[in-house]
Image (tube, helix red, strand yellow):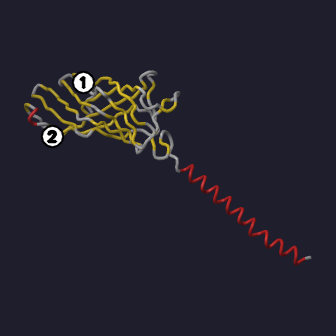
Amino acid sequence: MSLGRSGSSTSARPAASCRRGLLAVVCLVALLAAGATPAGGASGNGLVLKTKNGGPVSAGAPITLAIEVGPEGEGFSCGQELGGTVAVNGKPKDKVTFPSGELHGSCTSETTKFKWSAALATIELSSKGKIILRARATAKLIEPTGSCTYEVKKISGPMPIPGQLSFSFGATGKLNKPLSQGTCEEKTLRFTFSVVLTKTETKEVLET
């Protein structure tokens, strides 16, 4: 009898141990899966554009871009609003397109008149936290000593994930000598781009 009980007990231990080991593995896999999901609007490898109360924005939804541009650190900027459409949402690189992408702005400080323009086709929003404006901007500063024109060929910067799509970033312009007059000491100049993306129908700021 004693040997029978001992044999029975011995055979049960590995089974219980296996059950405990399997449970640990299942728990570990669940924890790893939960940890692999990014916070905020990034789901897996995709970025979800959404509104606070309305959930994800569907492809084809009208979007309004409000954009202002100004020389970095000068304390003034100007811009306009432009209508676009969500072309891609929920992917590693979401896109908002602008059929009529003509942008421009004009403003004046105490001593400087500032003008800028750009032809914007697409805004790309990356799940890695980067915004790219597919456009080239021309910025002109007019002062008593002359006018200096800069071209901004790469307009991109960091964006918040999670967070609202209402933020600013900097881009560098290079002096275009043929389009400039007078003395232009700065061969490159930094410009601040401030953008706000809203759902046109509800005026809600988009979030990631």
Does residue 188 sit above or below 81 in this rendering?
below
Q: Residue at x 34, y 32 (%)?
A: 97
Q: Residue at x 22, y 33 (%)?
A: 137
Kind of residue at disc 1: Gly
**Horizontal and vertical percent position of residue 187:** 15, 40
**Horizontal and vertical percent position of residue 10:** 80, 73
Question: How far is disc 1 from disc 2 in space, using C-alphas?
Answer: 22 Å
Label 2: state its secondary structure.
loop
Residue extending farthest to the bottom is: 3
According to the picture, the residue beneath numbered tag 1 turns out to be 105
Query: What number of labels is visible?
Result: 2
Label 1: state its secondary structure.
strand
For the N terminus, which image quadrant?
A: bottom right
The one of 20 and 71 positioned closer to us in this rendering? 20
- The numbered disc on residue 187 is 2
**Horizontal and vertical percent position of residue 114:** 20, 26
Kind of residue at disc 2: Lys
The one of 178 and 6 positioned closer to us in this rendering? 6
- The numbered disc on residue 175 is none
Left or right of 19 in this view: 105: left
Between discs 1 and 2, the one toward the N terminus: 1
